[in-house]
Image (tube, rainbow, N blue to C red):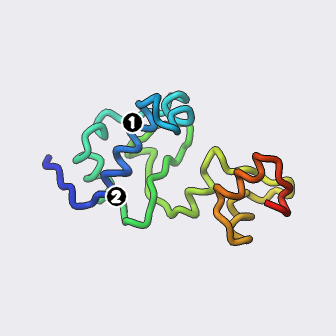
Amino acid sequence: MTLIMNDRRLYWIWSHMLSRCYKPTNASYADYGERGITVCDQWHQFPYFESWARASGYESHLTLNRVDNNKGYSPSNCDFITKEEQCRNRLSNHLMPNGDLACDVAKANGIKNNTFCTRIKKGWKVEDA
C-alpha cells in the first residue's frame, strides 16, 4: 500500500489519534491512553487508515468518531460525523440542571462550547456564562 499524502487534514486526524492514545505528553492522553483507549494494529500505518476513511465517507468537514466511547479506534467502532454531532459525545460536555447539554446552550447563545464550559467550571452562573 502506497502512502498518498494529498490530504493533510486526514493525516493530521490519524497522527493525533495515535498521539492521544500512546503519548503521555499529549494533553488529551488522560482521556484516551490512560483510559485504555487504543488504535487497532492495522491503523498504526497511515495507508490502511486512509483507505478505510475514504471508503467510509470521510469528507474534509467531518470528524473521526468512536461510536462506543469506551472502546478503541477500529473500523468496527469508528465513523465520521459533523463537529456539532461530535460535541455531544465529548466527556467534557456537561448536562445542565434543566437537562440540556452544554453544547446546545452554547450554540443557542452564539458562543463556543469550550468557552461556555470553561466559564461553568470557573463557577459562573449559567445565565452569565
Crowding around mark 1 (Cα neighbors within 10 Å: few <14, some 14 to 19, many 20+) is many
Q: Quadrant of the C terminus?
A: bottom right
Q: How many marks?
A: 2
Residue drawn 29% across the image and 57% down it:
8
Residue drawn 42% across the image and 31% down it:
23
Q: Which mark is residue 39?
A: 1
Q: 98 and 128: which one is in front?
A: 128
Residue drawn 18% across the image and 55% down it:
4
Q: Which mark is residue 87?
A: none
The answer to whether residue 21 is above or below residue 104 is above
N-term mark: 2 or 1: 2
Tell us which disc is closer to us: 2 or 1: 2
Tell me the amino acid under the disc marked 2: Arg
Q: Is residue 39 left or right of residue 88?
A: left
Q: Is residue 107 left or right of residue 16?
A: right
Give the secondary structure at mark 2. helix
- Residue 41 image-quadrant placement: top left
Q: 8 and 115: which one is in front?
A: 115
The answer to whether residue 17 is above or below residue 8 is above
Where's residue 48, x and y in %?
Answer: 25, 46
Residue drawn 46% across the image and 28% down it:
24
| Disc 2/disc 1 C-alpha distance (Å) | 18 Å
Task: Answer whether labels 2 and 1 touch (C-beta < 8 Å).
Answer: no
Tell me the amino acid under the disc marked 1: Val
Where's residue 89, x and y in %?
Answer: 60, 51
Give the secondary structure at mark 1. loop
Q: Is residue 126 left or right of residue 92?
A: right
**Residue identified by numbered label 2:** 9
